[in-house]
């Protein structure tokens, strides 16, 4: 990208992104971060740099937490276990839900 300038803002406003559909990368390249460049990317690809996949982003860690009403939850996914479960049941539910995450 050295030397490439955006035709909309005349700056080097690009970031590398991928468009993924059904688990398959259908496009990869540089997307603009300026307003007019984002609009152009949305018209051309249906996404802009904020909604396209960033292959360099660090995945959020899966951390088990408890909120004020006793519900366990995960910061990074939809997993929850309310206080009607025993500790052993909540542990088993957490382990089952996150086995694939830890296998990566």
Image (cartoon, helix red, strand yellow):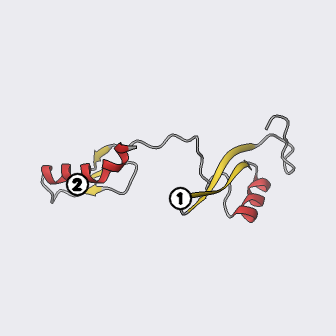
Identify the residue position indicated by label 1 in the image. Answer: 23
Eyeballing the image, is 93 above or below 58? Answer: below
Q: Name the residue rendered at 30%, 54% in the picture.
A: 97
Q: Quadrant of the N terminus?
A: top right
Q: Nearer the viewer, residue 92 or 70?
A: 92
Of callouts 2 and 1, the N-terminal one: 1
Does the rendering let one see residue 68? no
Q: Nearer the viewer, residue 47 or 72?
A: 47
- Tell me which corner region of the image, top left, top right, bottom left or bottom right, holds residue 57: top right
Identify the residue position indicated by label 2 in the image. Answer: 93
Q: Name the residue rendered at 75%, 65% in the picture.
A: 43
Label at residue 10:
none
Pointers 2 and 1 in contact (C-beta within 8 Å): no
Q: CA distance from mark 2 to mark 1?
A: 26 Å
Q: Name the residue rendered at 78%, 54% in the picture.
A: 37
How crowded is the residue under tag 2: few (<14 C-alpha within 10 Å), some, or many (20+)? some
Eyeballing the image, is 99 above or below 84? Answer: above
The x, y position of residue 33, in whole percent, is 72, 48
84 left or right, relative to 76: left
Q: Quadrant of the C terminus?
A: top left
The x, y position of residue 55, in whole percent, is 58, 44
Q: Name the residue rendered at 12%, 54% in the picture.
A: 86
Does the rendering let one see residue 15? yes
The x, y position of residue 9, in whole percent, is 84, 47
In what element is the residue under mark 2? helix
17 left or right, relative to 39: left
């Amino acid at each position: 990208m050295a030397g490439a300038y955006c035709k909309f803002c005349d700056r080097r406003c690009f970031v590398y992104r991928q468009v993924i559909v059904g688990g398959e990368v259908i496009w990869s390249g540089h997307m603009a971060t300026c307003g007019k460049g984002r609009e152009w990317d949305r018209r051309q690809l249906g996404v802009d740099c904020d909604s396209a996949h960033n292959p360099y982003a660090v995945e959020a860690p899966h951390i088990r937490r408890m909120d004020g009403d006793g519900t366990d939850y995960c910061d990074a996914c939809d997993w929850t276990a309310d206080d009607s479960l025993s500790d052993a049941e909540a542990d088993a539910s957490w382990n089952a839900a996150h086995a694939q995450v830890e296998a990566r």
